[in-house]
Image (cartoon, rainbow, N blue to C red):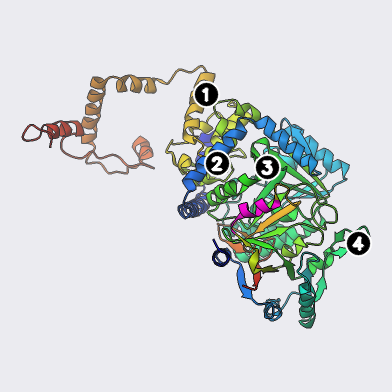
Amino acid sequence: MNASHNFRKTSAAAVADEVLGAAVGKTANILFSLRGAAVAGYPGFEELRDWGRSRKMEVSGDLGPYARRFADRLEAAGGHAHFARDGREAVEIIKAIAGRVGAASAVKSKSMTAEEISCNEGLAHAGVTVTETDLGEFIIQLAGEKPSHIVAPAIHKDRAQVAELFHEALGSAPGLDVGDLVRVARKALREQFLSADIGITGANFAVAQTGTIAIVTNEGNGRLTSALPSVQIVVAGIDKMIPELSDLPGFLTLLTRSATGQVISSYVTMITGPRRQGEEDGPKELHVVLLDNGRSALASGRFREMLHCLHCGACLNSCPVYRAVGGHAYESVYPGPMGDVLSPLLWGMDAYPDLPDACTLCGRCAEVCPMRIPLPEYHRKLRVLRAGLKGEAAGWRAQAWASMAENPLLYRAGVGAVRRVLSHVRGLPAKMNGGLPGAWTLCRELPHPQEGPDFRSWWEKRQKGPSGKPE
Amino acid sequence: MSNPEILERYIAMARAAGTDVECVSETELPVRLAAALPASGGNIAALSASGWPRGLRERVVARLASSGFEVTAPRKEEGGGYSWDIDRLAAAPVGIVWCEHYLADTGSLVLVSGPGMGGLATLLPEISLVLSPAQGCLGDLADYLQKTGGSPPSRITLATGPSRTGDIEATMTKGVHGPGKVVHFIIGA
Ligand code: SF4
């Protein structure tokens, strides 16, 4: 990301796109309700969130040793661990593996971490064609776009657009419905699975105790990617560590219920090393690329809990800003509330100066986050941090507000003045046309203060009561 | 929970996830299995080679033959390792495996790797038929992991219901990469 990103501009364009708004709103809403029901149906979910947070606190407090322990266990199980300081190093490692085995093609199961390092582009330079196999990722790869949601990457497309895309790119009949579209993708991708030299996956969890990688999918593409090709490369952030195998059930519950509202996803695959003696499937070589890319710096700072993120997407689905603009407006692999915080932290405040403002501080994300990451608080801290970086004092409006709020007499006088002004607009419609009033009431209504005394006078009168005593 | 209770819970959870659960006796099994075979899409059945209780695999093979199905299975090679005939496997509309354990809490099958265990037979074909003993039901993943004693097999897959996707407008659709239909026969329940 070179030029700095301008959220005001990108979000305005996104809001103007009606298909996008409807598609994102619909899916985010479904996922949000499914999560609500799944969490309500699990007594003890709140306690589980506390447990998850404390387990991840142990890991983020000791990230390096956990990652090294994982690497040792992985090697003991016959796999190869590679540490990559940044995305470029990670891509070099992956390219070197592909070059050594003479790979021409790879199948990939959805991985945001691989997206973060632009793995596909890197491999393309090395002459390796990468096919995305998650249906959503496959759709956007055909469309030449980027994912717009960390769990549902094609959330911005509706079925008509997908039918059109498949018609053009794959020659399927026009206007297919969802079931037929899925069949078309199955057939096209099956051929890729059977012929690919390399399988690339992400990891939902990396178990330090055993060197185990856990991959969660619904489609089965993660399973196929880690079963058919003879070389598997896993791209995992070092934040994916969990201490022990016995932690996995709890984290899986937190993840799947928060992400899609499922009790469990269709396939959870736990991989410990490559194919063993005599086995007929699984990779003969298993490589795990452990990516830092700014993560260890987070561990010692005041945004440490971002390292606990499970990438469940619940915060995106809950966010009024994300729902209105979709993922592309963020121009980052990580959109929505978690992205507002992660993008400036991983790629610098210069690259994403206004993402901390893409937030109304409504607090819904913190309510749904399974790891209890204080996302609104982090947005606020980033704004303060940004002001400090720019050597900015608070704006004159904020300063005026602060001095008024600190002085009760002044505050009361101010509120009285506003009431008097507002009493004159009582006759005006809640929505207005044109100019500043029109713009202001476009997405809010003109407040109509009620008639009668204000709260303070009412309260004082009530305290006295007719008998002079509190009623 | 006692075994009948967790079994009951398993059945409810697995059905909710979209698995067809059939409780059968050993004598009923061949007929019920034959009824679940696909009527179209070819006559190859992919069958795992290992893990079966004594004699059962032979009876399954016999039943498949009388239903007109040829069997493809991981074959033992000279070095002692197994391998699939991948073309025949890819052409099979149905896969059949033995699965020792399954989990009540989530309605999941526990598919483990191992020589000849034939995991791909539960993944590539459109229809996955899985056979298990009634006493193989465990409470949850924690119970299973405890059994592995901290040294898990190379791959453990929890398979819960058919393969599915919600990637187009969050419309749940079955059978995207894996099976669209999963039938779990619990023997002796
Ligand atoms: S920040 Fe929390 S809610 Fe958002 S994706 Fe991460 S774990 Fe999920």
Mark 4 falls within which chain?
B
**Gap in angstroms between the C-alphas marked 4 and 2:** 46 Å
Work out how far the residue at label 4 is from the one at label 3, CA to CA, in angstroms.
34 Å
Q: Are marks 1 and 3 on the same chain?
A: yes
Residue at the extreme front of the image, as rendered: B2
As drawn, A353 above or below A313: above
For ligand 1, the image quadrant comes to top right
Amino acid tagged 2: Gly
Quadrant where the image shows the N terminus of chain A: top right
The residue wearing badge 3 is A207
Residue A43 point in image, percent of width and height: 46, 52
Q: Earlier in the sequence, mark 3 or mark 2?
A: 2
Q: Furthest-right residue in view? A: B78
Q: Secondary structure at mark 3?
A: strand
Specify start and end residues of the magenta stretch as a single range: B139-148
Q: Amino acid at mark 4?
A: Glu
Judging depth in this view, the residue of A287 and A383 nearest the camera is A287
Q: Chain of mark 3?
A: A
Q: Find the distance from the CA under tag 1 to the CA under tag 3.
A: 36 Å
The residue singled out by tag 1 in the image is A386
Q: Tell me the crowding category of disc 2: few under 14, some 14 to 19, or many 20 or more residues within 10 angstroms, Cα based.
A: many
Figure quadrant of residue A124:
top right
Mark 4 in CB contact with mark 2 (< 8 angstroms): no
Q: Residue shown at 25%/28% (left/top)? A: A415
Classed neighbour count for the residue bearing mark 3: other residues with Cα under 10 Å, few (<14), some (14–19), many (≥20): many
Most common SS among magenta residues: helix
B96 with respect to A49 (left or right): right
- Mark 1 or 3 closer to N-term? 3
Kindly indicate whether the residues beneath marks 4 and 2 are on one polypeptide chain.
Answer: no
Tag 3: residue type? Val
Mark 4, residue position: B77
